[in-house]
Image: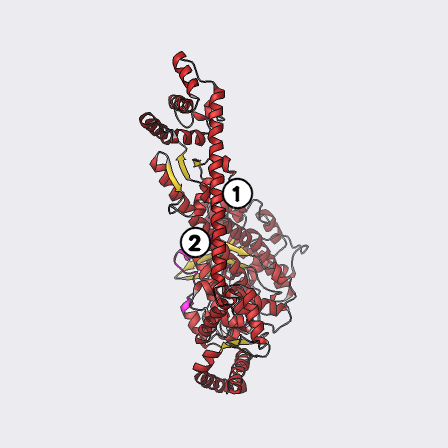
């Protein structure tokens, strides 16, 4: 954080009592406006105040900007007492901190606690420094807060560079597998969360503090919030170091465990935020957390653990179902679990936007590379020709056609205005597309090339193309001269005139040759009109041929479809059935149990219409749907699905496996020292495994 940024954050002055007023307060035995503990300890507080003021003045005059910390103040205080021969008992460290809080907790503070973030040996620590107003023009308290802002910002940046704001996810994931839930997880998993660190800028009253002491700390924390906490967050957020995620929407919901949910503040590094979200998704696939969501979605997420892209989507759907169940009055999570669910929900949106932005950036980078390649040619560059393989993706070509490439001119055959080009215009309606960098060198080279071809062969194709690109009839001479020299423009116009003259009737050309007269502009306009009319005819012929080809293709498809198995009127339904059979088998092999929601959410299976139709047929025992079987599971709408072939091939081994798993759950279900989280997960699994075993027994 720059010094100027910190200064900007402190436009107003922190509240304080001036040195003269403080000394008068200590001298005059007046109790008005002062707390009882201040009056009781007035003399001792005066000594401490004088000590801090002297240290502040020395630090400020030396320009070290190192304001005294608690240890330095205490040592200076005890040293000053010895020099004065004061033999009264010294306050211990706890009492001394209490006296400092009295000085800082008055309605007009005599001193300020300046909290400062430090990073040393891989750990964050919060140090408290102290300042009083100085006698110089610039207020030392203001400077002390500025210094803390600058140093704290630097420490946070340094910690991020050293990797201290990254959770050791490998250790965390190993630990949570054996832990019964978050309450038993001993490995820290919130290193990316800056709010936990920033929260420590506020001081907590000592245990057993009375209302008066609590009031002092409340005043101190008000100053911290106003002059350090809020400015630090704003400055680091502005510079992209922190990312603030507000949770007002969740706090205002009817879910009691979200009522005290904090706003999330992250040390913002895109890759680490994405990694955090993905690891929280892995959290959700554990029994202790996944039990709050729909079983089929839990199974889907569990099956996707090793596939990041699939886990990203499956985890998002699972956490949405969890929150829906919680808000709907289902089993309520602990505060720690609610925080994980809220984080996963919020991070999913952040990561989704990150990925969208990355895709946009990658697309823009690829487009820039293409445009740079055109510019380097410094001439006309053909970027599309009908019937040939695209030189680059269609979306990039359409950006050229929409004039969305900076400093780039486009010419097409036939001209875009003839086609009435729009975003839905098929590319095949263009015969050729050319790009020309909007600079003098490229335009001049293109004109010279077109003139050379015309003079040698009489081919005016490129002359007409450049005429369209430069919009020669409507562009002013001043603007044309931004593209090339007046001489080149004159040569281009003369050559174009010669080209159009060739289209005049023979007797007219003969007359001009004999008389040396100039061609009438109306004759040139008539020639251009004829060319445009011919271009329109070519367009229409192409469209007619294209439409005829599509009709032929459609008729051929109908005939081929008719030749298929006449008993299967729904080819798409048959295809969906095959995909569902493969997907269900694959899921069971991964110990995942697909339900209706999971199957409908799987995009690779095709249309949801056919998925629902097939599942309705399965659930209703319809003919033709016996290859898939439904296993009823309590509290799961639609149950879970298994294929007949999987059941026939692996049914005995699967039943044996789940019989064994049921036996393993018994000690957990009956144990007296097992926490409720593990028991809840065990009950859920017992219900699922029992349903599977019972179904297989009934199929014998």
Q: State yes or no: residue 160 in magenta.
A: yes
The residue drawn where x is 47% and y is 40% is 541
Q: Which residues are magenta?
A: 147-170
Q: Is residue 8 visible?
A: yes
Q: Residue 678: x and y, percent?
A: 52, 79
Give the dominant element type of the magenta stretch: helix, strand or loop.
helix
694 or 575, nearer to the observer: 575
Q: Residue 110: x and y, percent?
A: 58, 53
Kindly identify which residue carries mark 2.
157
What colouring method underlies this structural image?
A: secondary structure
Nearer mark to the viewer, of 1 and 2: 2
Upstream in sequence: badge 1 or badge 2: 1
With 168 as the anchor, is 631 left or right in this view? Answer: right
595 or 675, nearer to the observer: 595
Q: Which mark is residue 138?
A: 1
Q: Secondary structure at mark 1?
A: loop
């Amino acid at each position: 954080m720059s010094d100027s940024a910190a200064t900007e954050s402190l436009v107003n002055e922190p509240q304080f009592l001036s040195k003269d007023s403080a000394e008068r307060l200590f001298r005059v035995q007046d109790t008005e406006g002062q707390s009882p503990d201040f009056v009781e300890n007035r003399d001792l507080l005066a000594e401490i105040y004088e000590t801090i003021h002297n240290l502040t003045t020395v630090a400020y005059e030396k320009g070290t900007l190192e304001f005294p910390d608690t240890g330095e103040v205490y040592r200076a205080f005890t040293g000053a007492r010895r020099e004065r021969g004061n033999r009264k008992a010294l306050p211990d460290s706890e009492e001394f901190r209490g006296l400092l809080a009295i000085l800082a907790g008055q309605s007009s503070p005599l001193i300020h606690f300046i909290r400062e973030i430090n990073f040393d040996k891989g750990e964050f620590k919060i140090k408290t420094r102290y300042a009083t107003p100085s006698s110089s023009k610039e207020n030392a308290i203001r400077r002390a807060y500025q210094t803390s802002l600058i140093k704290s910002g630097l420490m946070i940046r340094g910690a991020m560079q050293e990797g201290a704001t990254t959770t050791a996810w490998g250790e965390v994931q190993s630990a949570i597998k054996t832990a019964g839930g978050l309450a038993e997880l001993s490995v820290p998993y919130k290193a990316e969360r800056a709010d936990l660190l920033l929260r420590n800028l506020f001081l907590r009253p000592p245990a057993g503090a009375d209302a008066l002491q609590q009031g002092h700390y409340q005043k101190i924390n008000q100053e911290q919030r106003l002059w350090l906490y809020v400015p630090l967050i704003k400055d680091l957020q502005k510079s992209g170091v922190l990312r603030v995620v507000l949770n007002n929407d969740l706090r205002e919901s009817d879910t009691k465990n979200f009522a005290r949910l904090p706003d999330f503040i992250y040390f913002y590094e895109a890759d680490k935020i994405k990694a955090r979200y993905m690891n929280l998704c892995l959290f959700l696939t554990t029994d202790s957390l996944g039990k709050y969501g729909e079983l089929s979605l839990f199974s889907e997420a569990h099956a996707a653990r090793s596939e990041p892209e699939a886990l990203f989507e499956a985890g998002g759907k699972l956490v949405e179902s969890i929150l829906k169940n919680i808000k709907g009055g289902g089993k309520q999570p602990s505060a720690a679990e609610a925080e994980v669910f809220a984080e996963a929900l919020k991070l999913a949106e952040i990561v989704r936007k990150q990925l969208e932005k990355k895709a946009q950036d990658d697309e823009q980078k690829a487009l820039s590379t293409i445009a740079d390649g055109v510019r380097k040619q410094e001439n006309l560059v053909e970027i599309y020709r009908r019937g040939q393989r695209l030189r680059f993706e269609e979306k990039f070509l359409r950006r050229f056609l929409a004039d969305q490439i900076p400093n780039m001119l486009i010419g097409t055959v036939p001209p875009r205005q003839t086609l009435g080009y729009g975003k839905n215009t098929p590319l095949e309606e263009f015969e050729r597309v050319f790009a020309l960098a909007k600079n003098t060198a490229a335009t001049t080279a293109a004109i010279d090339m077109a003139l050379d071809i015309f003079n040698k062969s009489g081919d005016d194709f490129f002359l007409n193309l450049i005429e369209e690109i430069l919009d020669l009839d409507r562009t002013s001479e001043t603007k044309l001269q931004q593209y090339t020299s007046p001489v080149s423009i004159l040569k281009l116009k003369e050559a174009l005139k010669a080209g159009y003259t060739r289209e005049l009737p023979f007797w007219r050309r003969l007359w001009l040759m004999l008389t040396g007269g100039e061609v009438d502009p109306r004759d040139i306009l008539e020639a251009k009109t004829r060319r445009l009319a011919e271009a329109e005819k070519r367009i229409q012929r192409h469209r007619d041929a294209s439409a005829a080809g599509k009709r032929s293709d459609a008729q051929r498809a109908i005939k081929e479809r008719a030749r298929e198995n006449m008993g299967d009127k729904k080819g798409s339904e048959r295809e969906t059935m095959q995909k569902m059979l493969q997907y269900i088998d694959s899921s069971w092999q991964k110990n995942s149990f697909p339900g209706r929601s999971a199957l409908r959410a799987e995009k690779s299976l095709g249309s949801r219409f056919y998925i629902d139709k097939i599942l309705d047929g399965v659930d209703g025992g319809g003919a033709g749907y016996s290859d898939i079987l439904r296993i009823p599971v309590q509290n799961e709408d639609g149950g879970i699905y298994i294929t007949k072939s999987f059941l026939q091939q692996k049914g005995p081994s699967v039943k044996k496996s789940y019989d064994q798993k049921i036996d393993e759950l018994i000690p957990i279900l009956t144990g007296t020292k097992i926490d409720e989280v593990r028991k809840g997960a065990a009950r859920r699994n017992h219900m699922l495994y029992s349903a599977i075993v019972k179904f297989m027994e009934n199929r014998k």
